[in-house]
Image (cartoon, rainbow, N blue to C red):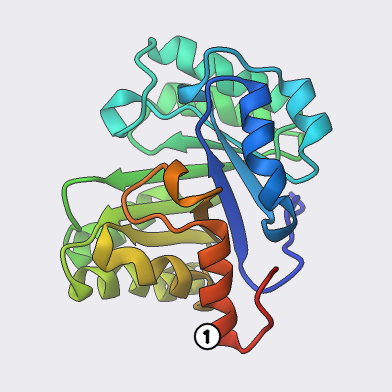
Amino acid sequence: MTDSAAPSRPGRICAAVAAPDSGSVIAAVLPVLDDVDVVEIRLDAMHEVDFALLRERIERPLLFTNRPVWEGGACAASEEDRLMTLLDAVGHQAAYVDLELKTAPSLRQRLLERIAGTTTRLIISSHDFGGTPSAADLSETLRRQRESGAHIGKIVTLAGDHLDVLRVLHLQCEARQLGFPLIAFCMGEPGRLSRIITVLLGGYMTYAATDERQATAPGQLSVRRLREAMACLTGAGAAG
């Protein structure tokens, strides 16, 4: 499957947006659109969604996530209903959909079957809001993600200190050996730097908020601050 979101500069930046309706999503993302490569739309935050309008107004690859309550999201619907929204996103030519590794394998298989023959790519994700597991447990999660049939893995944990950050970032070495694209960084204050470093180490993508007040995860930087930090580390000119 071809990559529907090749970045225009090193390291993909995805703007994560949680808003109640399509108009609010568009209004939030348009001011930063020039500085991002992908836009994540959190369906679990929305009361209504107009896929066609979003594709028309947001000229970037769209990633749709419908995060359940049991993995830190806001979707309290049945798993069947939650999956149907993601299936709809595929039908509307989403560039990516995100599904949790803990989702029932039968539901994952249905999503993969719907994706087959399309340009949509499946991100299989794992989030730990309680801490950072051991290196062995992280490696096992990566192995399971690679074997899931998904195109891209995502492992995000809550860091308590810099050692947690190092364990998660080391997954990029393992992912490269496996030939499996991986998104991996840490939440929380100690994890802020990992959101920048991960893409400089070859990570597939990192996430940022449209502005500081709209963060969708602990420790998430704004698009502008993330770009400025990357520019400092790479010697490139900062956006804006």
- Toward the viewer: 20 or 125? 20
Q: Is residue 173 above or below residue 144?
A: below
Q: Residue at x 64, y 44 (%)?
A: 39
* Secondary element at tag 1: helix
- Toward the viewer: 195 or 136? 195
- Toward the viewer: 58 or 98? 58
Residue 165 image position (x, y, % from top left): 27, 70
Residue 87 visible within the image: yes
Q: Residue at x 34, y 53 (%)?
A: 156
Q: Is residue 169 above or below residue 6?
A: below
Which corner quadrant of the image does residue 62 belong to? top right
Q: Is residue 235 above or below residue 103?
A: below
Q: Is residue 214 above or below residue 6?
A: above
Which corner quadrant of the image does residue 110 belong to? top right
Q: Residue furthest right?
A: 56
Categorize mark 1 by other alpha carbons within 10 Å: few (<14), some (14-19), many (20+): few
Type of the residue with mark 1: Leu
Q: Residue at x 18, y 57 (%)?
A: 133
Which corner quadrant of the image does residue 158 belong to? bottom left
- Pointer 1: what residue? 233
